[in-house]
Amino acid sequence: MENKKIYIMLSYTGTILSRIVKVCTLREYSHVSVALDLEFDSLYSFGRLQPRNPFSGGFVKEEIDGGTYKIFKNTRCKIFELEVTMLQYQNLKDFIDHFIDQSHAYKFNVVGLIGTMVNKPFNRENHYFCSQFVGKALLKSNIYDFGKDVGLIKPTEFAEIPGLKTIYQGKLSGYPSFLEAYNKGRS
């Protein structure tokens, strides 16, 4: 059976919340997203529902040229590729599809985010922050288990997953140009 690839993106927008997370974690990146395709037509996480409103958060389909990333043009990122089995890929797709279908039921877990900073998970039903969501997605898809409560996973910990291949690092606005060159090199 043929394997598939998924993509994990670490990013730093420079928003007030991302600056707080960066200071607390002492790491370069403060946000994590997961994508089912290299072009990021299926890039998902928990974040701002309305780009200019930091108090409105939930499950989001992110666009690298829209939403929050359009406003914060200097967003920096690191993008990883991870090979998974077809079954793991389908499990991840099914997990994400459930969130897409029920997106109205999910909210941003602000309290849980604070919990990561004091090393105490505050899990609330139907509430997630970015790394909690992506961590649970990978766990439920049998892709990776961090060996701890998903409410304690920090974005930068995703860079430590065995088998990750860094494919891009730099400004997110430069990713489309990179992608064009990358795809030409593969054909």
Image (cartoon, grey):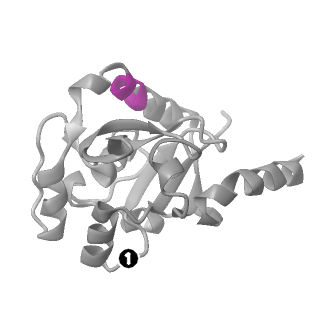
Residue numbers of the magenta segment: 95-100
Residue 59 lies in the magenta stretch: no
Q: Residue under label 1, please give it.
A: 27
Name the element at disc 1: loop
Q: Main secondary structure of the magenta part?
A: helix
Q: Is residue 166 above or below residue 138?
A: below
Q: Nearer the viewer, residue 180 or 153?
A: 180
Whether residue 139 is visible here, answered yes or no, is no
Left or right, 91 with reference to 169: left
Q: Is residue 30 above or below residue 3?
A: below
Q: Residue furthest top?
A: 101
Whether residue 47 is visible here, answered yes or no, is yes
Snapshot quadrant of residue 53: top left
Which residue: 52% across, 36% down?
89
Q: Is residue 164 above or below residue 94?
A: below
Snapshot quadrant of residue 147: bottom left
x, y percentage for residue 139?
A: 34, 45
Left or right, 127 with reference to 169: left
How many marks overall? 1
Which residue: 47% across, 30% down?
93
Q: Report the amino acid beneath label 1.
A: Arg
Q: Residues within 10 Å of mark 1 (few under 14, many from 20)?
A: few
Which residue: 33% across, 73% down?
22
Q: Quadrant of the N terminus?
A: top right
Which residue: 18% across, 47% down?
109
x, y percentage for residue 152?
A: 21, 60
Residue 97 lies in the magenta stretch: yes
Q: Nearer the viewer, residue 93 or 118?
A: 118
x, y percentage for residue 150?
A: 24, 53
